[in-house]
Image (cartoon, rainbow, N blue to C red):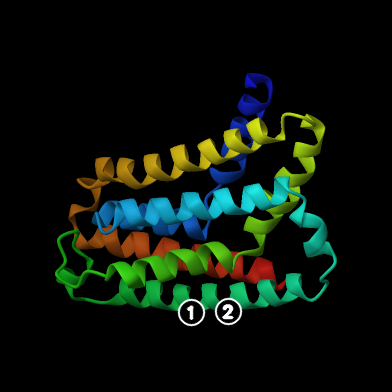
Amino acid sequence: MATAFIPGFLLGLSLIVAIGAQNAFVLRQGLRQEHVFAVCLACALSDAVLIAAGVAGFGMAVDALPWLEPAMRYGGALFLFAYAARSLHSALRRRHGHLAPSSRHAQSRYAALATCLALTWLNPHVYLDTVVLLGSISSQYEGRKTAFALGAIAASFAFFFALGYGARLLRPVFASARAWRALDACVGILMIVIGVKLVM
């Protein structure tokens, strides 16, 4: 089992650690300490569903629907541009209270989960990494696919919870409004770059 679990874990981790829209959102929630458990769990469970679908062969069904990929791509880009505008707007705001970690204008759990799920399920790269790539590689582990999938799923849980709860270690750095503005600006620019890549 370990001969399939460990490769699945390492491959899954290597695909997740790249900075992306989803990771940036989890980091921000961790810094603000808002709904961290719910957000991390939503990300990890989403990955688990997609990885299981890929290992089960769902990637072939996706290939049979040629309209699905461009629809997700443009829909995801539109959402990323909207989120980028919101982040850049926050970066330019002068009200310090809105950017402080202890802000009273906390995002509701429903809004946080809705944003998290949109950043996850509207991103075509998530499907390419989990359903297509992990699904195709799992075919090399015939008879041990379950262990391979469990390894990749374990990597998702480990990474997202480490990112979400480990972000609090950076809270002293983000004690000033200037640091929060810089973070929001970086997130906004990152969203625009990813969105442009999706469109192109």
Place of residue 138 in the rendered image (x, y in percent of width and height, measured from the top left):
75, 38
Q: Hey, which quadrant is residue 124 in on the image?
A: bottom right
Q: Is 196 placed left or right of 170 in the picture?
A: right
**Where in the figure is residue 122, as x and y percent of width and height?**
58, 69
Under circle 1, the secondary element is helix
Query: Where, by quadrant of the figure, is residue 149 drawn?
Result: top right
Q: Nearer the viewer, residue 5 or 101?
A: 5
Q: Residue at x 31, y 43 (%)?
A: 165
Q: Residue at x 67, y 58 (%)?
A: 127
Report which residue position mark 2 lands on: 78
Q: Residue at x 41, y 51 (%)?
A: 41
**Residue 170: x, y in percent?**
27, 44
Position of the N terminus by quadrant: top right
Up/down of 20 relative to 196, above or below: above
C-alpha span from label 1 to label 2:
6 Å
- The vertical placement of 163 against 187, above or below, is above
Q: Which mark is residue 82?
A: 1
Element at badge 2? helix
Instruction: Residue 63: give x, y in percent of width and height.
Output: 83, 63
Say above or below: 126 vs 110.
above
**Crowd around label 2: few <14 · some 14–19 · many ≥20 (10 Å):** some
Answer yes or no: do the residues labelled 1 and 2 have beta carbons within 8 Å?
yes
Give the camera-side residue of 27 and 50.
50
Q: Is residue 16 left or right of residue 43?
A: right
